[in-house]
Amino acid sequence: MAHSYTPGLTVTERTTVRRRRILPLPGTVLAKVGDSVRADTAVARAELPGKVVPLNLANQLGIAPDEINDYLVKKEKDSVQKDDVLAENKPFIKWFKTEIRSPITGKVESVSTITGQILLREPPRILELRGYIDGSIVEVHPDQGVTVETTCSLVQGIFGIGGETSGELVMGVTAPDQPLTPELLTPAMKGKIVVGGAFLSAATMTRAKELGVIGLVAGGIHDKDLRALLGYDLGVAITGTEQVGFTLILTEGFGTIPMAPKTFALLSSRAGQKASISGATQIRAGVIRPEIIIPQATPAAGAKAPRIEREGIQLGDPVRVIRDPLFGKIGAVSGLPPELRAIPTESEVRVLEVRFPDGTTTVVPRANIEVIEGA
Amino acid sequence: MTEQPHSPAAPAVTHPLNVIVATDCGSTTTKAILIEKVGEEYRQTYRGEAPTTVEAPFEDVTRGVLNAIAEIEELSGRTILDGERIITPNQATQGDPKRGVDIYVSTSSAGGGLQMMVTGVVQNMTGESAQRAALGAGAIVIDVLASNDGRLPYEKIERIRSMRPDMILMSGGTDGGAVTHVVEMAEYIAAADPRPRFGSTYRLPLVYAGNTDARPQIKTILGEKTALDFADNIRPVLERENLAPARNKIHDLFLEHVMQQAPGYKKLIDMAGAPIMPTPAAVGVIMETIAKRDGINLIGVDIGGATTDVFSVFNGLFNRTVSANLGMSYSISNVLAEAGLDNIMRWVPFTIDEQTLRNRIKNKMVRPTTIPQSLDELQIEHAIAREALRLALIHHKSLATGLKGIQQERTISDVFEQRTSGKTLIDLLKLDLIVGSGGILSHAPRRIQSMLMMVDAYEPLGVTTLSVDSIFMMPHLGVLSTVNEQAATDVFVRDCMVYLGTCIAPIGQGKDGERCAGYEVALPDGRIEKGQLGFGDLKLFPLTREQQATVTMQPAKQIDLGNGPGQSFTKTVTGGVVGLMLDGRGRPLQLPSEQAARVAMLSRWYQAVGLYPTGS
């Protein structure tokens, strides 16, 4: 049968990742190919156009739109300071004089004799784009940005919130099924990324914020705690711009779900090292998953970003069940019946058989398992 | 991305079309069907599907298409692919009828579909007309900006800049009227300098369909900054809407610009023997065709993973809306956010704590391709679907209206009736047919589940027929009808439309168990089923599509079946795979607010019609 499988999340000790760092609009690239950069190095800079403020001069002066050029003190492209006179009328009696003053400092962008309005624009804002990961520049996109490459350990999460940050990775728990409780967080964790086990409570998140923890990684949280954290019910999984005080990454899902042992072991082995994390998630066109990138000093010989092109599920593949009633359980594929099978809902679907570490087996719809990639 | 715009025009097909392969590239799955001419008629024979591949690591929509077609190859034993090429035409004349197909056609909504921003001058006049034009072309409208939308000018500019639409439609002003406001809006757009969603270097397509007198000014202001194109004014005079030219222009630009930027679409366009259509536009073609053919009023719904499209044809007037964030996978959590937990819980026939339910819904959101494995999971999804359908219809009703702002002539007889212009066109009592499509309706394990989901969500009044798209192939047939009408019609009638049955629902409310109406059903085998329909009752009689039954009902005082309160009613109806349903649950539908009573009531209804396997 054709390739129907759910691509899983990557959890791998060593790989090469490339991240495109692209400005939202054309600007200046500050690095060149071969440069080493750190997560906080500025690699490109752009000027974000200032806010536009329209003023309808014709209305305010009580004149026809096509007459406004006769009343302008400032012309198109002129610079203006706040409270500078933009336009004025010239009455016979001084008392009736009307002056229109600029509400902002900036410049006159355009003047329209059709609508009688003048558009003022505030000065541009400088935007500096950082490297995000420690690595080297492998490509420069003129006027747009760069591509940074690094050899690293990589863990992809299932869902996250908050933007990019970097700091030291520390373990908050000793086992993947242990919840990260508030008392496990200490002042020494300020500015660091703390890894929990199966669960994070609202109290833990509050404590993390108080202490200045910059990142939290755990198996799961409750949706109601997410709602409380954000202040609204998240409808569509497009995240990355939230400002909640830290970046949050879930490796498994919602609820209390032990972190996959492989993920936990990898993160434990990298404790004390610097990591770059991003909570940005987009589960729609152009899937983006949150990630933990831990750069490794010595590049692997000839390491290339592996392009995973699986031909489908094979017997023995490690898989995780991703839907209730066995949500979060990890096992290995022990059977791949080709025919459709009826499941308890009466739907006839393609299934597979999974053997769990305790030796038990069960039948699960193929749509409800995820291959553990990078195994 | 600097490719030149590619012409969407496909070479005319000269050979006969006997074997056709069609795909629909959805946001989650790519579905392929094979259609073959058997004797004198076309039939849908095989079906395959594969995950859509617009995303990393593939970033090429054609991979999913080839995978879905490969599944058809395996099932049918026909060779369709030669590497990454579709073999056309069919090699029957070369003595190998099992090799190749005569044409490949496709629709697409992958990558989020066509996302548009529209502008007008007066929000509920040209703003709404522009919205209807964009929706009719199969777009998702991400915002409607109007001179009187209550936002300050700088807020409008910020909004235009922050959105990244695939295309903008500008309208405003009647021909020969004032140009000021529409030019003002053009100035805002120019100041914002909006950028397209895909591709950072190409210019954003913009269709201007407003006052024709303003065209020179619009060209001066936006000609350099956007890929500007003109269409006839969508509101040439206040009393008339002219949406077709703008709609066609949107289609052209969609193919020429937008699709060129999406991953792999250039290849897909080359593979296809007819222009690629946006999925909702193709479904719209089918809905309009059914309504016209049968001379009926209908509501169609396509509930997908990310969006829910609603189509309606009332008195020949076609409308479409899309609720961009109501869906069963990517947007499932938004259904919870919009409907509220209580509204979802009211359809669940067991108790479940809020935390568990919330976590389950979020887990579906982050892993959108999973399916319910246990019965309770299925029941939760069906509960959510009811709310998504209900909310999408409310949205549709608000847009499928008569033109607003029109002067109405009033005579002395209108003195006591304050009618406003812009009333919704949706009249459930005049509704003849509901057509359901989309995974949750097409693939429900029992057809009665689809029927009851739609009845509960829409609460049809009086007599209404219900049907579903058998395996979700309306988009395919919509695009096929543009190249071969007969093939599309044959398959539609024989393989696509599954009539579920007829629902008869008296209007009015009463206490549980109270008499709602007396009924007499004359069944085709000569039997007559007689009885009383009480409030809270749901009765189902087996009746096939080919059979007819004559139903006579005597409603209680105050209860209406379309002839007025208490008036008797007789009608001959046909059935379907489910049959004839008498719905005495009241209109508006009543559900007990107390939890245990509600669960008991739901269980009674569900058992009465055999909704789910028993013993669960």
Image (cartoon, coloured by chain):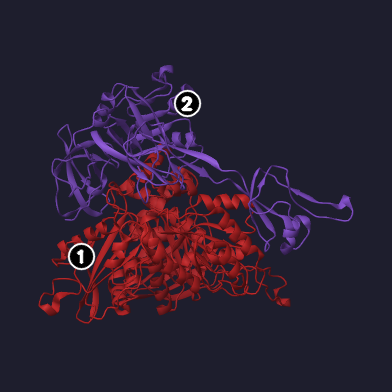
Residue type highlighted by circle 2: Lys
Q: Give the quarter of the figure containing the N terminus of chain A.
A: bottom left
The letter of the purple chain is: A
The image position of residue B596, as x and y in percent, is 44, 43
Residue B524 is drawn in which quadrant? bottom left
Using a 10 Å C-alpha cutoff, classify the residue at mark 2 as few (fewer than 14 neighbours), some (14 to 19) or many (20 or more): some
Q: Closest to the observer: B127 or A38?
A: A38
User: Does A335 sit left or right of B127 as displayed?
Assistant: left
Same chain? Circles 2 and 1: no
The image position of residue A277, as x and y in percent, is 37, 33
Q: Closest to the observer: B146 or A367?
A: B146
Q: Is residue B216 visible?
A: yes
Colour for chain B in the figure: red
User: Does A372 sit left or right of B167 as displayed?
Assistant: left
Label 1, on which residue? Answer: B85
Label 2, on which residue? Answer: A209
Q: Residue at x 33, y 45 (%)?
A: B367
Q: Give the quarter of the figure containing the C terminus of chain A.
A: top left
Residue type highlighted by circle 1: Arg
Q: Is residue B87 above or below residue B147?
A: below
Using a 10 Å C-alpha cutoff, classify the residue at mark 1 as few (fewer than 14 neighbours), some (14 to 19) or many (20 or more): few
Q: Is residue A200 visible?
A: no
The image position of residue A81, as x and y in percent, is 68, 42
Q: Secondary structure at mark 1?
A: strand
Farthest residue in the right direction? A93
For the residues marked 2 and 1, what is the alpha-carbon distance in whole angstroms? 55 Å
Q: Closest to the observer: A136 or B234?
A: A136
Farthest residue in the left direction? B95
Q: Is residue A329 above or below residue A90?
A: above
Q: Residue at x 55, y 51 (%)?
A: B159
Q: Secondary structure at mark 2?
A: helix
